[in-house]
Amino acid sequence: MTTLVASSSRLNLIRQTQAASSKAFWRLLVIMFLFSLFVLLIVGRLASFAVFDGAHAYDSVSSTYIPKRGDIVDRNGAPLARTIDAYAIWVNPNKIFGDKKDLAQKLAEIFPDTDADKFYGKLMAERATYLRKRALPSQVKQVHALGEIAIEFPREAERLYPQHDLAAHILGFVNQEGTGVLGMENVLNEHLSNPETRANPVALSIDSRVQAALESELLRGIKSTGAKGGAGIVLDANNGEIIAMSTLPSFNPNTPKFFDIPEDYSLSTSGKTPLSRQVNSVTNRVYELGSTFKPLTVAAALDAGTVRDLAIRYDATKPIKIDGHKISDTHASYRWLNVPEALVHSSNIVTARLADNLGKDNMDEMLTNLGFNERPVIELGEKAKPLWPKNWGRVTNMTVGYGHGISVTPLHLASAYAALVNGGIWRPSTLVKRKKDEKIEERRVFSSATSARMRQLLRMIVSDGTGRNADAPGYRIGGKTGSAEKPSEGGYARKLVVSTFAAAFPMDDPKYVVIAMVDEPSGTAATSFQRTAGWTAAPIVKKLVPRIGPMLNIIPDEHRDVDVSELLPLLWKSKG
């Protein structure tokens, strides 16, 4: 009996345990279902937000961070101009708690470029005013530590040029309203300020590395020659892109405070910049560029057929006297010269004879095809119109042949040399990076055969002629020197010279044109007291090309060069 009772109790216990387990199982199942439903609701809400609200949210956030004025970058994306939220320092004089004279003195200690009296004047004003429109964070921290409750620190949009004066004449600057008034800032105003386009940076054609190298070597050349200033350009010979362009002395577009004061290097640290430094000498000043024109005259003569045989010699034994004018050579040879010799020795007399044979019509056609009759083709608004002779007679045609009597910009010359070496095609220059498959306007100026011949002759000028000081081993530089006296009242100022070297490299497959111009070199010990381009401008190119060549994927190779073997005997015969 006892055994039956015990068995029944165990059976009841087992049943109760099973019932409890079953109840716990269903409770757990319900909890898991509710948890899964909760998770699904959250995931669904997140998905809904992403699909329906995400785009609007992104637009809202992105529009917040779009600058008030778009960025300008170089061809590799390096920033050249951008708008940032900078600190300003603002004061309400009526709410100043402390002593105003003491406060002015402390502000002058923080900002040593502004004296205490000027700050005191602002602190005594009747209306709220700026103490500083742009201040460094460290300066803001110092002013904040003064504890003056009347001073506030608003964040305001400021145009910043992180490379300081690099490419200043290309970039230009903006006015206090944030509108571009010079350079590409002016050209790109609409794109940079339009809410629909300003989020996309504008890529210029320039390479900031090449630009820095050009400015560095140009400045070194100016200092070593005692020159007033200089200009330079690196141009892609095949698509017209300007890789670098410089005018020196320059200015800092972050602080464009210009004054109508005399040009003087000593003013560079005074906080004042001469108004003349705004002028872009590459595009907005014209010069007689002298003997750099001679290869253009030779090329035109080859195409016109007035020069058929380079071995034919021309009388350079004495100056040409015509219509009361005398055309002579700076370094006279006093003998008959053929065309290669005339270029190698830079003979005005022979080039004048070639221009005379060529005639005004052919000369005019060539110069017009090169765009020498109009302002340079470039996006900038700062462009000078060339000066052409009013009465183009025989004598004028002869002097124009060697670069006198006509004035153009260095950019005109660069584009002309590109056509001279790239196969004979002129293309417009640009400061905006070209698209990969962009169609470029072009016109033929020289035949491909003439261009090939000119590459030989330009290389010989550097290897054997007046351009020897530009020769950089392995880079096969070719080019021509040009030294021209500046026009003045009643003639020319013999002591004021513009020295130019126009070059291209590598001459066996020209990629880039380089122009270096030195304005009014005085001649120093570094130039053996010479002012001509062979001593002043050519060395700039010699130092520049090895610096920029590797940046432009051109590696020096001393085992390659232009084949001039057929022309060398022409030079040898003259020495016999």
Image: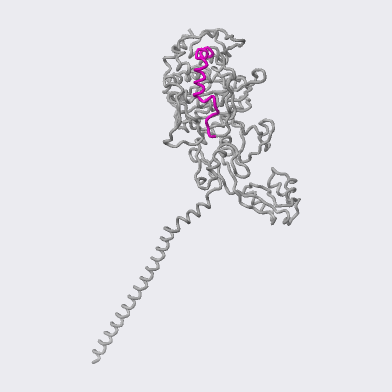
In-image side of 35 versus 515 (left or right)? left
- Specify the segment rendered in magenta: 351-379
Residue at the spot 53% in from the left edge and 52% down from the top edge: 64
* Camera-nearest residue between 402 and 144: 402
* Residue 343 vertical position relative to residue 231 in the rendered view, above or below: above
Q: Is residue 360 magenta?
A: yes
Q: How is the image coloured?
A: one colour
Q: Main secondary structure of the magenta part?
A: helix
Q: Quadrant of the N terminus?
A: bottom left
Across and down, in percent, residue 506 comes to 45, 25
Residue at the spot 44% in from the left edge and 37% down from the top edge: 435
* Camera-nearest residue between 39 and 172: 172
Across and down, in percent, residue 234 comes to 51, 30
Across and down, in percent, residue 295 comes to 50, 19
* Residue 93 vertical position relative to residue 364 in the rendered view, above or below: below
* Residue 392 vertical position relative to residue 70 in the rendered view, above or below: above
Q: Is residue 229 magenta?
A: no
Q: Is residue 471 visible?
A: yes
